[in-house]
Amino acid sequence: MDAAIETVGLKKTFPAKGKGGAVEAVRGVDLSIPHGEIFGFLGPNGAGKTTCQRMLTTLLPIGAGQARVAGFDVAREPSKVRCHIGAVGQLGGSDGPATGRENLMLSGRLYGLSRRDTLRKIDEVSELLDLGEPLDRVVNTWSGGQKRRLEIALGIMHEPEVLFMDEPSTGLDPQNRANLWTHILRLKERGMTIFLTTHYLEEADALADRLAIIDHGEIVAEGTPEELKRQVSPEEVAQRIQREVPSGATLDDVFFKICGRRLRDAESEEEEVA
């Protein structure tokens, strides 16, 4: 299989709350993501990006269409998909009253690793993600950046082929966010495919090899960050300078041109469907 993640006509519909009828959260998404790529999935709340990720990670049944992850059919082989992926959610999954080492030990054993292999992996991921100093303290005493790195470590204890990351830097200050980006790039260097859901334009620009913009459940643009930014004309950039906004074709300009509104404006319009 050439692609680490592949979808054809992926759809999901939910009942409309209190209105009758249905809401099309995802409307025929086609994706092909090669192995070893960081793929950015960009869009405002309510665009369908989290719903797509939940289907790909088997947390939601697929409404229509097909999806394959790490070579396995998501609808027909969900248990095999789960064995080959890792997931880092927005809310995290660590146990606060336990130490970092205890969290990692539990994760390794739950994934079926022997005690010896789990201890080896704890040393490996701790070095990779700079967890040595706080490892034997209870997680409730860790900083926000340390907790996010621990949550990534929990997601890669079993050496997944594909790692799904849903808004990994939400709530972090700029310094911790930049630090986290460095660690995400280290995972890519190890050959891991990373599906990165984000609404931070600078995060997608800094990390993604390619990205897709989803709006109202449909892919409205796809390409490398540079390819998408070339869609913005010099005249549009000049108008941005005249408005005394930081110059240069940024991804926010791209989003505005394609979707007709700024991403942060879109964020305040609606809540995530699911």
Image: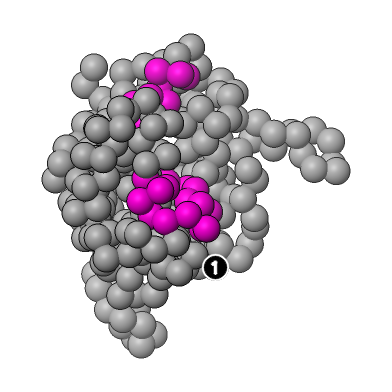
Disc 1 residue crowd, few under 14, some 14–19, many 20+, Cα 10 Å = few
Q: From which residue to which does the magenta span run?
A: 78-104
Please identify the quadrant where the N terminus is shown. top left
Type of amino acid at the residue the image marks with label 1 = Asp
Decide whether residue 103 is among the magenta residues: yes
Q: What element carries label 1?
A: helix
Q: Residue 205: image x %, image y %? A: 27, 59
Question: Does 34 appear above or below 71?
Answer: below
Decide whether residue 45 is among the magenta residues: no
Total numbered labels: 1
Asked whether residue 229 appears in the rendered view, the answer is no
Left or right of 44? Residue 272 is right
Q: Residue 137: image x %, image y %? A: 39, 63
Q: Name the residue that disc number 1 marks.
A: 265
Splitting the image into 4 quarters, where does residue 117 fall? Answer: top left
Question: Does 22 appear above or below 252?
Answer: above
For image coordinates 36% across by 87% down, the residue present is 244
Splitting the image into 4 quarters, where does residue 242 fall? Answer: bottom left
